[in-house]
Image (cartoon, grey):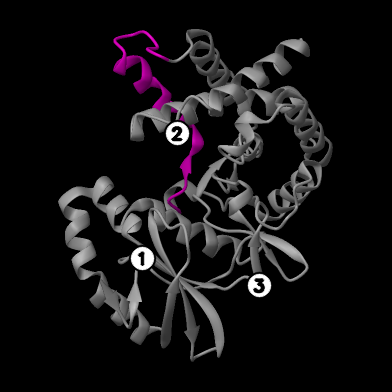
């Protein structure tokens, strides 16, 4: 399949069909025409897709309007992409890639192309402490206060809705936890409840999925891509970082010590209590394992090593 000479990876098409069924097939059939229309609308020459695509099609492109290289991102129309558009519109390039234009109906985004554009994971920057400090700086820039009455005007969901997905685990296994360690599931449930009960009232716009492959080099700094457009307390984004990069982190020999260093750095730079960061990381690691089980039925065990390591850190500080 192609439009303007564009071909997309089979994996992208298969993922679209897996997730959206017949509606996904119908959308893929229309995609060549849609790409042509967007290229004409935004005066683009479309290039090649970026590697390792899954849920969305991301293409390099040339903008005749600005005479610069840009990026076109499009996926099956859904709220997740509309939330991303809203998040990038609000942040105006602060800590994140700049949104140049968007089409909410077709869930298409025209983005600046980051240069040199390598990820924090692929940059050769294997020093974990330095990568953690870079992540903390990016977090401080992208966290954005929400406008008054934002719940009525903007589509940002609270991360508590994500955490609520853990309730499906016990329903799946008739009230038990199935192959998941009962002590970790119970702990995640109680930690989430406590974290949301004790969170500060002023939520911020979060990234929602900040990991090493979602931070790219740009100029002499770093910017985030692919925000989820969710709101909550800042500690939530740290919890996501603690279990990444996945799955490479899961098998490191010094996992517990590495996590302890990360928590110390984030606490120092962001002014958040270590116990709260550990609690978010532990609860989210269990939730992530459940998501993997729910979506794929496999590949969920590794992240529980992070949950166990964080539980050890938690008990050692009490």
Residue drawn at x 36%, y 14% is 170
Query: Do labels 2 and 1 touch, CB within 8 Å?
Result: no
Say which quadrant the N terminus sits in: bottom left
Nearest to N terminus: mark 3 or mark 1: 1
Helix, strand or loop at label 1? It is loop
Helix, strand or loop at label 2? It is helix
Q: Distance between the residues labelled 2 and 1?
A: 23 Å
Query: In this rendering, does residue 173 appear at all?
Result: yes
Which region of the structure is painted magenta?
Answer: 154-179
Q: Nearer the viewer, mark 2 or mark 3?
A: 3
Nearest to N terminus: mark 2 or mark 3: 3
Helix, strand or loop at label 3? It is loop
Percent position (x, y) of residue 137?
A: 76, 51
Residue drawn at x 28%, y 46% is 19
Residue bearing mark 1: 104
Q: Which mark is residue 115?
A: 3
152 versus 220 height, above or below: above
In this picture, residue 180 sits left or right of residue 253: left
């Amino acid at each position: 399949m192609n439009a303007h000479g564009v071909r997309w990876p089979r994996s992208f098409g298969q993922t679209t069909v897996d997730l959206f069924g017949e509606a996904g097939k119908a959308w893929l059939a229309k995609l060549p025409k849609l790409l042509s229309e967007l290229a004409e609308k935004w005066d683009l020459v479309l290039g090649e897709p970026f590697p390792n695509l899954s849920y969305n099609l991301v293409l390099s492109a040339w903008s005749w309007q600005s005479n610069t290289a840009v990026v076109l991102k499009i996926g099956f129309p859904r709220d997740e992409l509309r939330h991303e558009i809203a998040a990038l519109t609000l942040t105006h390039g602060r800590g994140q890639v700049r949104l140049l234009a968007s089409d909410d109906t077709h869930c298409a985004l025209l983005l600046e192309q980051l240069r040199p554009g390598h990820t924090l994971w692929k940059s050769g920057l294997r020093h974990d402490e330095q990568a953690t400090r870079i992540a903390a700086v990016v977090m401080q820039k992208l966290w954005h206060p929400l406008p008054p009455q934002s719940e009525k005007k903007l589509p940002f969901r609270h991360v508590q809705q994500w955490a609520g997905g853990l309730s499906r685990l016990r329903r799946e296994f008739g009230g038990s936890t199935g192959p998941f360690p009962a002590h970790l599931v119970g702990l995640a449930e109680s930690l989430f409840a406590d974290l949301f009960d004790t969170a500060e009232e002023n939520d911020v716009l979060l990234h929602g999925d900040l990991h090493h492959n979602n931070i790219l080099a740009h100029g002499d700094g770093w910017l985030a891509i692919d925000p989820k457009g969710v709101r909550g307390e800042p500690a939530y984004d740290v919890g996501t970082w603690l279990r990444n990069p996945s799955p490479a982190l899961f098998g490191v020999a010094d996992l517990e010590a590495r996590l302890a260093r990360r928590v110390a750095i984030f606490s120092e730079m962001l002014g958040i209590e270590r116990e709260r960061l550990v609690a978010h990381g532990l609860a989210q690691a269990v939730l992530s394992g459940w998501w993997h089980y729910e979506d794929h039925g496999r590949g969920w065990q590794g992240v529980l090593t992070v949950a166990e390591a964080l539980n050890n850190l938690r008990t050692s500080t009490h």
